[in-house]
Image (cartoon, rainbow, N blue to C red):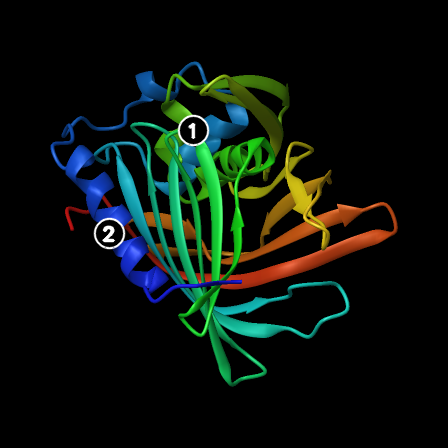
Amino acid sequence: MTKIGNSLKNLYLSEVKTDLINTSNYSKDIITEKDILTLPKPVQRYFRYCGYLGKVKMVNAKTEWKDIDFKTAQNKKWIRIGCLQYNSVSEPTRIVYLQSKILGIFPFEARDKYKDGKGNMLIRLLNLFTIADAKGVEMDKSGLVTVLSEISILPTYALQNYIKWETVDNNNAKATLTYNDITVGGTFNFSDKGEMNSFYTENRYFAEKDGTYKNIPWSIVIDNYFEKDGLKFPNKIKVIWHFKDGDFEYFKGKISNIEYNVME
């Protein structure tokens, strides 16, 4: 473990501030039928159902989470965590800050980031010791496909040139995201009325205890939606690893609010 004395929350806030400088002069163009015309039919339904048409195109988003439970391993108990999240679309970008306490006593923080084509997970204990600093091609791929899954949070990802779409059927669409010479993909499932129900991919990596990575199918599931200011947002979300011997649900939480085109 490396001893260090700098809050990961401060790092998160600094990285978000830097990205905001690059996205502050965003266009006031609105989302139109023309923008979604070439998307698969179920994705078009999603844009209409959520009320995105006629709204200013979202260049970034800050997501407020609550009631998050997390498991570090299948045989571990759920722990309650706090979370701050930021995404932007000019290039695939996702920055997340997590904090909790081990055994309800010892504070730990994590900063999970995909930016400039690179994925990185930093974990610190007691704000003093770095116990993980994961980097490499597996983290790059995992970070990129997680960005893809978060079309559910920042819908204008779906309109970017770095994402290509393919229709599967009336309720499913495949998306492929290529950035920095890495390509990942997955399948989105939608209800008949336009709700995004889930995202499934085989392009994400699970970190083993020995520091190696294993390619494991992964999915997010959306259980509910809420409405605010004419927009519908995903509410209850759970995240699952699909191992051969059974599923491992390791994250479940609620989105309480999403703020688009933030300036600070």
| Front in this rendered view, residue 118 or 65 | 118
Q: State the residue at coordinates (57%, 37%).
A: 142
Q: State the residue at coordinates (68%, 46%).
A: 206
Q: State the residue at coordinates (47%, 31%).
A: 45
> Whole-percent x and y of residue 129?
47, 66
| Front in this rendered view, residue 228 or 122 | 122
**121 left or right of 79?**
left
Q: Residue type at mark 2: give it.
A: Ser
Q: Residue type at mark 1: give it.
A: Gly
> Whole-percent x and y of residue 110?
46, 60
Q: Residue furthest bottom?
A: 105
> Whole-percent x and y of residue 178?
49, 19
Q: Is residue 18 visible?
A: yes
Q: How many marks?
A: 2
What is the secondary structure assignment of the residue under circle 1? loop
Q: Residue 215 sits in which quadrant?
A: top right
Which quadrant of the rendered structure holds the N terminus? bottom right
Query: Taking 37 as reference, is 255 above or below it?
Result: below
Query: Taking 28 as reference, is 230 above or below it?
Result: below
Q: Is residue 261 visible?
A: no
- The residue indicated by pointer 1 is 117
What is the secondary structure assignment of the residue under circle 2? helix
| Mark toward the start of the polypeptide (2 vs 1) | 2
Q: Residue 115 sits in which quadrant?
A: top left
> Whole-percent x and y of residue 79?
58, 74
| Front in this rendered view, residue 114 or 82 | 114
Query: Taking 149 as reference, is 10 above or below it?
Result: below
| Front in this rendered view, residue 160 or 198 | 160
